Amino acid sequence: MQFVAIKAHSFANQQSMMKNQVLCFGEVLWDTFGTEKVPGGAPMNVALHLVKQGIDATLVSRVGDDEEGKKLLTFLKSN
């Protein structure tokens, strides 16, 4: 298992004098819908949506040290 802490910054929020900061912790997983797999987990979804709203969010979770875990890390780093 690999420990993951990803800090996401909103460009709009960096310009503000007052910053809202949120720590989200919990599962990051694959939601499976038939043959389709999409990254999921409530804490991850909350962190991603907060960043879209201009709020700094940090996600703390763990992922497996396998191909599926590496794909989740790639997704998180690109979003």
Image: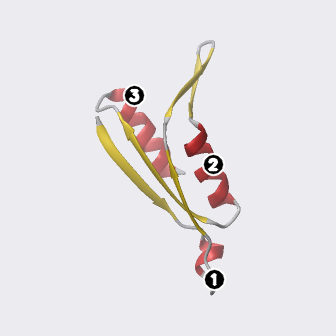
Q: Which residue is mark 1?
A: 18
3D distance between C-alphas at marks 3 and 1: 38 Å
Q: Report the residue at 59% width, 52% height from top.
A: 47
Q: Earlier in the sequence, mark 3 or mark 1?
A: 1
Quadrant for residue 53, please give it.
bottom right
SS of the residue under disc 1: loop
Q: CA distance from mark 1 to mark 2?
A: 21 Å
- Labels 3, 2: front one: 2
Disc 2 on helix, strand or loop? helix
Looking at the rendered structure, the kind of residue marked 2 is Val
The picture places residue 3, in percent across and down from the top left corner, at 32, 45
Please name whichever residue, 5 or 25, is drawn nearer the observer in this view of the structure: 25
Decide: few, some or many residues near mark 3? Use Cα within 10 Å; few <14, some 14-19, many ≥20: few
Q: Is residue 2 above or below residue 21?
A: above
Q: Does 62 appear above or below 60?
A: above
What amino acid type is highlighted by mark number 1?
Met
| Foreground: disc 3 or disc 1 | 1
Residue 54 as seen in the image, left or right of residue 59: right
Left or right: 57 as drawn, with respect to 64: right
Give the amino acid type for the residue marked by disc 3 in the picture: Glu
- Labelled disc at residue 68: 3
Residue 46: assigned label: 2
